[in-house]
């Protein structure tokens, strides 16, 4: 009987996190400044998705002008890959922005409901600390000029 052992790619220890990973599905969350190490057709390139897209696009143009259609196609495919990564990151950022806006709106609605429905009928009286308006959102008092006192 031939038993094969599965090999794991990650040989690093998990540290103090008890083996749990903060990344979902083993994917690293990316942002615009995430640096990629790319091994292209015959060149190794390092940079952000935007930089790699531009570099591979330029390599593809250079190969096209040199008459090497095969190399040009390979470079353009690499450029397309990083173009798709840029689009995925932009879409994830937009979705995250939308989710944050929805959460902020829900918090505002909860605060408004708490202020408008006090049991004693007074608006805004004795709110818990977590229901206080965010600084800058509360109404500002009107400041009247004070008469100057003359000394004498």
Image: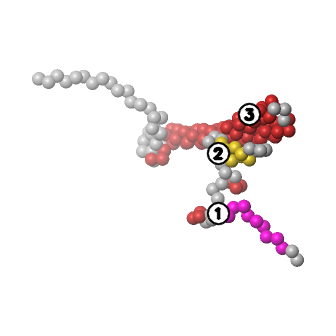
Residue at far front of view? 66
Magenta range is 3-11
Q: Which badge, 1 or 2, comes first in the chain's sequence?
A: 1
Q: Closer to the camera: disc 3 or disc 1? A: 3
Q: In this view, does 19 lie above or below 44?
A: below
Identify the image quadrant of the N terminus.
Answer: bottom right
Identify the element where label 3 is drawn: helix
Where does residue 59 sit, x and y in percent of width and height? 75, 36
The answer to whether marks 1 and 2 mark residues whose Cβ atoms lie closer than 8 Å is no
Asked where in the image residue 16 lies, by quadrant, the reply is bottom right
Residue at far right of view? 1
> Crowding at label 3, few (<14), some or many (≥20) Cα neighbours within 10 Å?
some
> Crowding at label 2, few (<14), some or many (≥20) Cα neighbours within 10 Å?
some
Judged left or right of residue 83, residue 136 is: left
Q: Which residue lies at the image location 46% right of the left edge and 42% below the top edge?
A: 132
Where does residue 108 sit, x and y in percent of width and height? 54, 39
Evaluate whether residue 65 shows in this view.
yes
**Which residue matches tag 3?**
58
């Amino acid at each position: 009987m031939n038993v094969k052992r599965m090999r794991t790619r990650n040989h690093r220890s998990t540290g103090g996190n008890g083996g749990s990973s903060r990344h979902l599905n083993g994917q690293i969350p990316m942002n615009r400044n995430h640096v990629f190490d790319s091994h292209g057709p015959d060149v190794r390139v390092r940079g952000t998705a935007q930089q790699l897209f531009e570099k591979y696009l330029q390599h593809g143009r250079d190969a096209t002008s040199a008459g090497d259609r095969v190399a040009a196609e390979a470079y353009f495919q690499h450029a397309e890959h990083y173009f798709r990564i840029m689009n995925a990151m932009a879409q994830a950022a937009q979705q995250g922005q939308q989710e944050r806006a929805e959460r902020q709106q829900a918090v505002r609605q909860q605060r408004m409901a708490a202020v408008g429905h006090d049991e004693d009928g007074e608006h805004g009286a004795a709110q818990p600390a977590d229901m206080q308006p965010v600084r800058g959102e509360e109404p500002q008092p009107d400041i009247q000029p004070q008469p100057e006192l003359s000394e004498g």
